[in-house]
Amino acid sequence: MSKAYKITLALLVLLLAVLTWLEANEPEPVNWSPSYAAVDKNPLGTKVLFENLKQQNLELREVKVPPYEFLSDSTISGTYFFLNNSLSFDQQELKKILSWVARGNTAFFIAENFGQNLLDTLNLKMETLVPQKGISSKPLLNLKDDALKSSSPFLFDKEAYQDIFITSDSLPKDVLGVTQLQKDSAKISDPKINFLRDTVGKGMVYLHSTPKAFSNYFLLQDKNARYAENVLAYLPPQKTFFWDHYYKTGKTFYTSPLFVILNSKALRWAYYFVIIGSLLFIIFEGKRKQRSIPVIEPLKNQTLDFTRTIAGLYLDRADYKNITSKKIKLFLEYVRSNYRVATNEPNPDFYERVAAMSGNTKKDVEELWQLMERLEKKNLISKKELLELNKAISAFKKN
């Protein structure tokens, strides 16, 4: 190995090591996928909000089952808090939630997209704000109540969709918060509704269309945490707060088949029986070992080697007459087997038939048979004549 080759190899190894180190130490890209899960530290997770709620003076309970199943207990009362990028309940589940609210409870819905059945029930419509000038779609947020609103609106400093509510004048709602896409000034000059309240029986339903305002990214920006604090100030005091984990885009779920098996009584016992049965089989049957089967090599086909040996003996002895005779017999057997014709009495019809079936001309067939007859009659045959015969037979078979 030359010195230049060693230096080049060392440089390549060093380059590979540097690239590997750079790749390993490269920071992971920020995941902006909406999650809103309480354990998610991503920008659009809600770990900051959830941990802050746990420190407040309220009874925080986590709900990991569907609302229809959770609200089957008639003794439950308090505030049911839903936060996700999309909330869509089926008709029976929505009816269950609103019946529970009508008994004097509170439902807090925060999402960008709501199911049509919920909007129809509350006589609401939704639209998405579109920037009129430029391409900026950063939303400004504020509350309407003088005691809660800020002198300057809160800004979600990231391009985002902003959905708003369209209310019907015939059924007025309590408008609690407004929004607008950022313009040249830092004020909300054309307010659109993004936070409202409606009564259902003895209870209250709150709807907010900007879940990003409760995400980790928003709450960790300057004074923005005060916006979420002021929104949640509408919650009824001294009541249980139920945090929904079920309707979450980024909720955790188990994919292990063993988890599914062990959480079902029937499957769990079936799994145990399989393990016990396998252990018993190993204990009682493991000692019985089958005797190894010897490998028997198949007999080799030595016909070709034998033929080559015999042919070599004939050639060494220069017995061309014998070789010619055997070669003619083999060829005639070949003709009889392949073309189903008798070769003992060649005649013009025979030549025409063999020529037609073999693809040769009648003249070539006649010349080949004449050559074989002439050689059969001779007592001595030269090597040249044997090669001539072999060449003629090969040409016949080739055609």
Image (cartoon, rainbow, N blue to C red):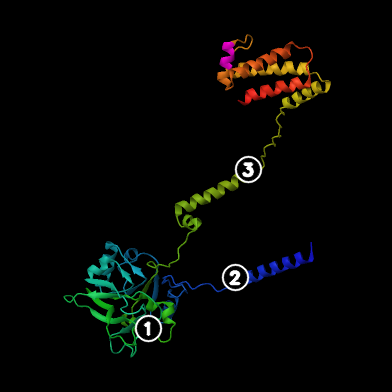
Examine the rendered structure and indicate whether residue 69 appears above or below residue 28: above
Provide residue 9's location: percent of width, then percent of height.
Answer: 72, 65
What whole-number distance in Å separates the C-alpha atoms at marks 3 and 1?
73 Å
Numbered badge on residue 342: none
Q: Is residue 133 left or right of residue 250?
A: left
CA neighbours of label 1 inside 10 A, class few (<14), some (14 to 19), many (20+): many
Q: What residue type is labelled 2?
A: Glu
Secondary structure type for disc 3:
helix
Alpha carbons under labels 2 and 1: distance apart: 35 Å
Task: Say which amino acid is labelled 3.
Answer: Phe
Name the residue beneath numbered marker 2: 23
Q: Which residue lies furthest to the left in this view?
A: 170
- Judged by depth in the image, the label closer to the viewer, 3 or 1, is 1
Q: Please tell me which residue lies in front, 222 or 13.
A: 13
- Compare marks 2 and 3 and give the one earlier in the sequence: 2
Q: Using a 10 Å C-alpha cutoff, classify the residue at mark 3 as few (fewer than 14 neighbours), some (14 to 19) or many (20 or more).
A: few
Circle 1 sits on which residue? Answer: 155
Q: What residue type is labelled 1?
A: Leu
Q: Identify the main secondary structure in magenta.
A: helix
Residue sitting nearer the eye, 242 or 133: 133
Other-residue count near label 2 (Cα within 10 Å), few / some / many at <14 / 14–19 / ≥20: few
Say which label, 3 or 1, has the lower sequence index. Answer: 1
Q: Residue 5 at x, y = what percent?
A: 75, 64
Q: Name the residue under label 3.
A: 284
267 within the magenta span: no
Give the mark toward the camera: 2 or 1: 2
